[in-house]
Amino acid sequence: PESPRGICGASRDVMVTRNLLRAVASGSGCYIHVVENTALNLKNTAKEKGRMKGKAALERLAKLFGVSGSDEWETAEKVADAVLNDLYKPEYVKMELVEKIAYPPRFKRWQELGILPGGAKSEVFKGVVKCSTNLNSDPVNMLIDCLRLGISTGIYGLTLTNLLNDILLGEPEIRTAPVGLRVIDPDYINIMITGHQHTMFVHLQERLTAPDVVAKANAAGAKGFRLVGCTCVGQDLQLRGAHYTDIFDGHAGNNYTSEAILATGAIDAVISEFNCTLPGIETVCDELLVKQICVDDVAKKANAEYKPFVFAEREKHSSEIIDEVIASYKNRRPKVKLNLLPEHGNGNTLTGVSEVSLKKFLGGNWKPLVDLIVQGRIKGVAGVVGCSSLVSGGHDVLTVALTRELIARDIIVLTAGCSSGGIENCGLMVPEAAELAGPNLKAVCKQLG
Ligand code: SF4
């Protein structure tokens, strides 16, 4: 711009930080929404004495929080309440679990810097207020808000969402699993799931394998139901897939693969509960007669039927969804041509890696990994994480090329989110990928089998 300031007098730094803070507050709001709903689902499940699939995860988290109950349900309720109580604190009251979850030296530094976050929802609110027209014009002050929001999003929206999911959905176990479009089996009624709040699917998942519901699928001409993974929810169910072998087909692909998944013609419904249900799939669903159902209106799609998930009404909710998906299957299968790609992806991607499962795999401590780094056999561990985008050469091009380069230089890659969807579909997470690694990393991989 020719003028150094905007018409109101705001400098470029103010404009840029204001936009950054708006984006950060908005992103934080998204993931705080996810952890809030996850904690509420845990609390509601505990109140009704529902199934806690990850009992060890519950014990670990309760110990970390310093809470206990007379049975697993009371403990789970206390764990959920500890999270919710923090989320609902005002902005001027610091959240209590940060110190219990964060890496201690880092917590100390945050404390020294005065950037410990207050109640997560209030921090989002404050961030949104600050970046509105002619309010804050101090870039450093706004950047400090970004740091606070980053801490609350990382600890609550990401770490705690995962740890609560471990309790309700079961903990990850290291195993190999099929990935890519090959996972889609046209003999079943296939539901593509998208989002990040899959504790909302627990009841539906269980119903889909119940004999009376399978009988309904059989009567419609299918062998039963299958969930086809897409976006983060698919990635996460793959991670926990050892608990879902009877219903989960595998992770077909990431955000931008969703169009291709639908284009196989074998998906009968899309059920979404959060991002990234791309608006671009709406026209594809219309064309291929795929029923779209959305269970949380924060991610309501224009042509999706909105069926809000209400825990107390989950029986009715699941039953209605099942009937609608069967109706979609019956309507569309005689009319829509299949374009399957059974060769796409691979059958043996390594999955199920979590802090707990990896440590167990290494023999109960991190020493073997640290020793490899100290001895110089590998140079370290790099994270290639986050969303997949279409920039930098196209879909997954940058992340796949970067990963190839890193492993060729003897650096282990840890990947998560949609980036990992592309990296695994391109064959970089199968045992044979050791051949693409540098000599030291290759030897380590072969030693580990
Ligand atoms: S990793 Fe990113 S792009 Fe993929 S589903 Fe999650 S938020 Fe969306």
Image (spheres, helix red, strand yellow):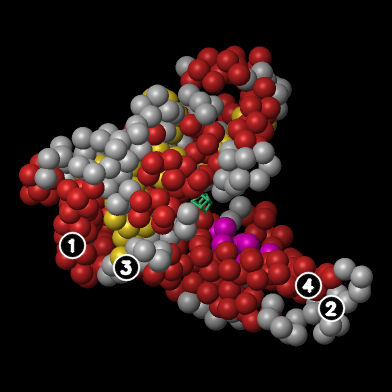
Mark 3 and mark 2: Cα distance apart in space: 42 Å
Q: Nearer the viewer, mark 4 or mark 2?
A: 2
- Along the polypeptide, which appears first: circle 3 or circle 4? 4
The correct choice, above or below, for 418 with respect to 159 in the image is above
N-term-proximal mark, 4 vs 1: 4
Give percent across and percent down for residue 103: 61, 52
- The residue indicated by pointer 1 is 320
Q: Residue at x 23, y 47 (%)?
A: 332
Tell me the amino acid under the disc marked 2. Answer: Gly
Of the residues shown, which amino acid type is indicated by label 1? Glu
Residues drawn in magenta: 147-155
Tag 2: Cα neighbours inside 10 Å, few (<14), some, or many (≥20)? few
Q: Give the CA separation, mark 4 to mark 1.
A: 48 Å
Q: Is residue 440 visible?
A: yes
- The answer to whether the residues at label 4 and label 2 have Cβ atoms under 8 Å apart is yes
Asked if disc 3 is less than 8 Å from ligand 1, the answer is: no
Look at the numbered disc 2 and give the secondary structure of its residue: loop
Residue type (three-letter) at the residue carrying disc 4: Met
Whichever of labels 1 and 3 marks the residue nearer the N terminus, that label is 3
Give the label on residue 306, or none: 3
Q: Which residue is mark 2?
A: 6
Q: Is residue 339 left or right of residue 203?
A: right
Instruction: Single out the mark in the foreground, 3 or 4.
Output: 3
Q: Residue at x 75, y 85 (%)?
A: 134
Look at mark 4 in the image and give the residue it sits on: 15
- The residues tagged by marks 3 and 4 sit, at their Cα atoms, a distance apart of 37 Å
Disc 3 packing (10 Å; few <14; some 14–19; many ≥20): some
Q: Position of residue 13 (x, y in %)?
A: 83, 70
Q: Earlier in the sequence, mark 3 or mark 2?
A: 2
Residue at x 62% of width, y 77% of height = 128
Q: CA distance from mark 1 to mark 2?
A: 54 Å
